Amino acid sequence: MNYHIGIVEDDENIQNIVSAFLKKEGFDVTVLDSAEKGLQLWADNRPDMWILDIMLPGMDGYEFCKKIRNESNVPIIIISAKDEEIDKILGLELGGDDYLTKPFSPRELVARVKRLFKRTLSENSGQEIQDKVKVGSLVIHKNDRRLFWEGIEQDVTTKEFDMILLFAENVNRAFSREELLVRVWGEDYYGSDRAVDDLVKRIRKKISEMPIETVWGFGYRLRIKEE
């Protein structure tokens, strides 16, 4: 399968380097210099992945990421010169699947692209019988990534979904912050465990009755009495 990758980046040098490396690996690539053009491409011919800069003319990358994530779980890799931890957390919480700080190695970017496609293919190949996870008032449909609490579908980001699914598949098990970082963000993420606390806080704010319990000095668990 020839995956189609949309690159939203206004730096011509980075456009040329990234597209050349990806094309060499057999990917189809469309390069755009603004988020507005990216949305037009999304409407006309949806890419299988986005590589997205944050600082763009007009609409910024954060807003673009949010708009795409509201419609799809297509993988998004953010590349940005913004290297503060809060910038990375914001990008990931808005729905980015990975975050690379400029300057970066094009080969590393290609490796992350391949890893994300491999993960997505693995997620989409699960059998239907294993699709549904139900514990208490929580119901998750893994294949189409829909989540319901007390019968009401919840609007959650990619990382929120991944964390809740991990808890639901291991109900009542306590996870350390370090393990949650690896399981939700991946082994290549080098941010602090503050990202875990912030994500739990966002989930609790959205679904206040979901019993995510703090295990003091360790991490978190979803405490639900299974039916």
Image (cartoon, rainbow, N blue to C red):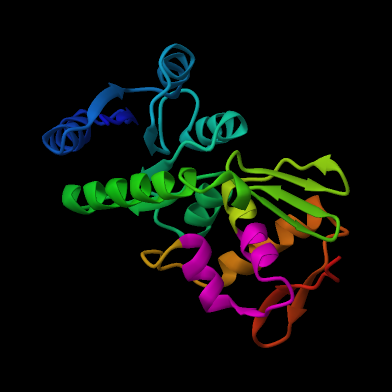
Left or right side of 205 for 133: left
> Residue, x 60% and y 38% (percent of image)?
144
- Which residue is found at the position 69% from the left and 63% from the top? 168
Q: Position of residue 118 (x, y in %)?
A: 34, 49
**Stretch in magenta:** 163-185
Image quadrant containing the N terminus: top left
Q: Magenta includes 208?
A: no
Q: Is residue 99 above or below residue 221?
A: above
Looking at the image, which residue is at 79% across and 55% down?
Answer: 138
Q: In the image, residue 194 lies at what x, y percent?
A: 58, 70
Using the rendered image of the protein, determine whether residue 125 is visible from the camera's viewpoint: yes
> Does any portion of residue 103 appear in the rendered image?
no
> In the depicted view, which residue is nearer to us: 211 or 128?
128
Answer left or right for 118 relative to 17.
right
Where's the C terminus, which quadrant? bottom right
Q: Work out whether residue 50 or residue 46 is closer to the camera in this orientation and state it.
A: 46
Count of marks, rendered view: 0
In the rendered image, residue 174 lying in the magenta stretch gets the answer yes
Asked where in the image residue 22 lies, by quadrant, the reply is top left
Picture quadrant of residue 15: top left
Looking at the picture, how far across and down is residue 215, in whole percent?
73, 83
Query: What secondary structure do most residues of the magenta stretch adopt?
Result: helix
Name the outermost residue toward the bottom: 217
Q: Nearer the viewer, residue 3 or 169?
A: 169
Q: Is residue 33 above or below residue 66?
A: above
Q: Position of residue 198 (x, y in %)?
A: 65, 63
